[in-house]
């Protein structure tokens, strides 16, 4: 079973560093150079300075991050809690589909273990590059600077109900991000509440929703350090699978490198063979959620005509993914990868891992514009993967293709840090 514990967090002291609004940042992997500069301009203590470090003198960015975090601790801008706590998080947001929702979760430290049933499971394959970057940063700072987002089953919401009474007062901090999501954070130290949360998660299996690279980095770092200590734990934000505000959205696929090749003709032949094809309005490119068989939107930069593709028979997917568990054979991203990306488009596993000829867009509008502008040659517009299917596939012991899910909203960086050394 996963071992979930309250933590003695590192966190900003608003009296020294200022309000959390100026200090928190999006996850490192969604920040472009312009956004990084804007975040840094908000405060010299903004979390982006250590989580996505750049040395002004052009020296080692990881050493710079370590020195900066140490300076923040020395001046009291970042302090460590005297006693362990869970930290309740409430996120009020407008979903990409326009719904107003609230998601409830909490921060904890979780013992790092190998993946396996009853403990911690991944749900997506990862890319190699980010793992090396995060490992070098962890070695230098000896801290988790951004949390992993994980899910657990709690049908009666016992863990959240134990924390909820503590959210009635003023929060420790509040941030409204660029998407308009309101993040509020409370420190919970009541012994009864802490015990109730741990009891609710006694038999919990955790499913990583976002942060696979960070978790795999934590495993490597723990083994490098050896022995016992804070390095055996990692910072997580935990949300119940049954939370009404838990939502997942699609990440659309974009392909390039088709011009001047035989791939467009091979692609057209595959689509005609395996899919019913219907011309539709561009606004309808993203199909409504539903079960098997696969349905998706398609448009290329040559004709710029939007189509709906519907798999003619689930048996086609079953044959293409022979040997894979049944929930995986119904997964839209897996079927698209097997029938199209690795078929007529000829992408290899290495191409997909290193984004050669493949791109992603979480926004339908962005995905559409990138094809219409010719930045990509074609786009496949996908529906959401249900949370229940994510869990079924993880329980079957297989990982989805990269970017199969888009959990919204993101969990911000800088709300809390988790020290990995035992220094005070």
Image (tube, rainbow, N blue to C red):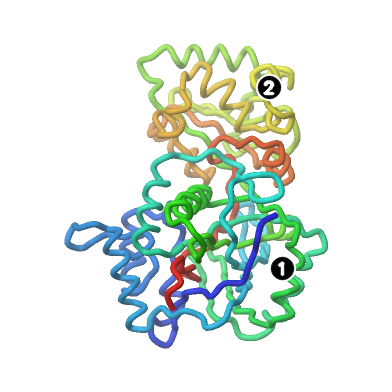
Q: Is residue 276 left or right of residue 59?
A: right
Label 1 element class: helix
Q: Which mark is residue 236?
A: none
**Which label's residue is closer to the chain start, 2 or 1?**
1
Crowding near the residue tagged with mark 2, few <14, some 14–19, many ≥20 C-alpha atoms within 10 Å: few
104 relative to 355 in the view: left or right: right
Residue 87, given in percent of the width and then of the height, sits at: 60, 73
Residue 352 locus on image (x, y percent): 46, 31
Q: Which residue is mark 1?
A: 198
Residue 7, located in which quarter of the rendered image?
A: bottom right
Q: Residue at x 63, y 70 (%)?
A: 90
In the depicted view, which residue is nearer to us: 84 or 124? 84
Residue 313: tell me if it is visible: yes
For this rendering, which residue is in front, 420 or 180? 420
Question: Residue 213, image x and y in percent?
Answer: 48, 48
Q: Nearer the viewer, mark 2 or mark 1?
A: 1
Can residue 371 be seen in this snapshot?
A: no
The label on residue 323 is: 2
Callout 1 crowding tier (Cα within 10 Å): few <14, some 14–19, many ≥20: some
Query: The C terminus is located in which quarter?
Result: bottom left
Distance between mark 2 and mark 1 Cα atoms: 38 Å
Residue 291 in percent (x, y) is at 75, 34
Direction right: furthest residue: 156
State the image quarter where residue 128 is shown.
Answer: top left
Q: Is residue 395 found left or right of 86 in the rendered image? A: right
């Amino acid at each position: 079973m996963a071992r979930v514990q309250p933590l003695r967090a590192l966190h900003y002291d608003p009296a020294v560093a200022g309000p959390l609004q100026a200090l928190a940042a999006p996850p490192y992997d969604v920040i472009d150079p312009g956004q990084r500069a804007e975040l840094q301009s908000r405060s010299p203590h903004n979390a982006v300075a250590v989580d996505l470090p750049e040395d002004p003198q052009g020296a080692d960015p990881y050493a710079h991050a370590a020195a900066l975090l140490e300076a923040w601790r020395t001046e009291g801008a970042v302090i460590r809690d005297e006693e362990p706590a869970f930290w309740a998080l409430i996120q009020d947001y407008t979903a990409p589909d326009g719904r107003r929702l609230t998601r409830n979760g909490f921060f904890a430290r979780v013992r790092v273990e190998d993946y396996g049933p009853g403990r911690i499971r991944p749900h997506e394959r990862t890319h190699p590059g980010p793992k090396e970057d995060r490992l070098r940063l962890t070695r230098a700072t000896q801290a988790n600077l951004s949390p992993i987002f994980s899910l657990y089953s709690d049908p009666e919401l016992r863990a959240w109900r134990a924390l909820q009474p503590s959210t009635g007062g003023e929060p420790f901090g509040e941030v409204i991000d660029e998407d308009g999501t309101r993040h509020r954070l409370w420190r919970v130290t009541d012994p009864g509440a802490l015990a109730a949360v741990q009891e609710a998660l006694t038999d919990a299996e955790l499913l990583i929703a976002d942060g696979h690279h960070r978790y795999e980095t934590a495993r490597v770092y723990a083994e490098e350090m050896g022995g016992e200590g804070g390095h055996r734990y990692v910072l997580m934000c935990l949300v119940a699978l049954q939370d009404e505000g838990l939502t997942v959205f699609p990440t659309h696929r974009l392909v390039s490198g088709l011009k001047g090749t035989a791939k467009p003709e091979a692609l057209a032949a595959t689509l005609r063979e395996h899919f019913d094809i219907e011309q539709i309005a561009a606004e309808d490119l993203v199909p409504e959620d539903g079960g098997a068989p696969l349905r998706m939107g398609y448009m290329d930069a040559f004709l710029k005509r939007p189509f709906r593709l519907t798999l003619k028979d689930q048996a086609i997917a079953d044959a293409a993914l022979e040997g894979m568990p049944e929930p995986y054979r119904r997964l839209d991203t897996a079927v698209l990868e097997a029938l199209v990306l690795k078929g007529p488009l000829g992408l290899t596993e290495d191409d997909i891992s290193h984004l050669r000829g493949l791109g992603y867009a979480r926004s339908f509008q962005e995905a559409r514009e990138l094809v219409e502008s010719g930045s990509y040659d074609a786009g496949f517009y996908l529906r959401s993967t249900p949370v229940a299917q994510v869990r079924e596939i993880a329980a079957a012991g297989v990982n989805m293709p990269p970017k199969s899910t888009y959990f919204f909203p993101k969990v911000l960086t800088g709300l809390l840090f988790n020290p990995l050394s035992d220094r005070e």
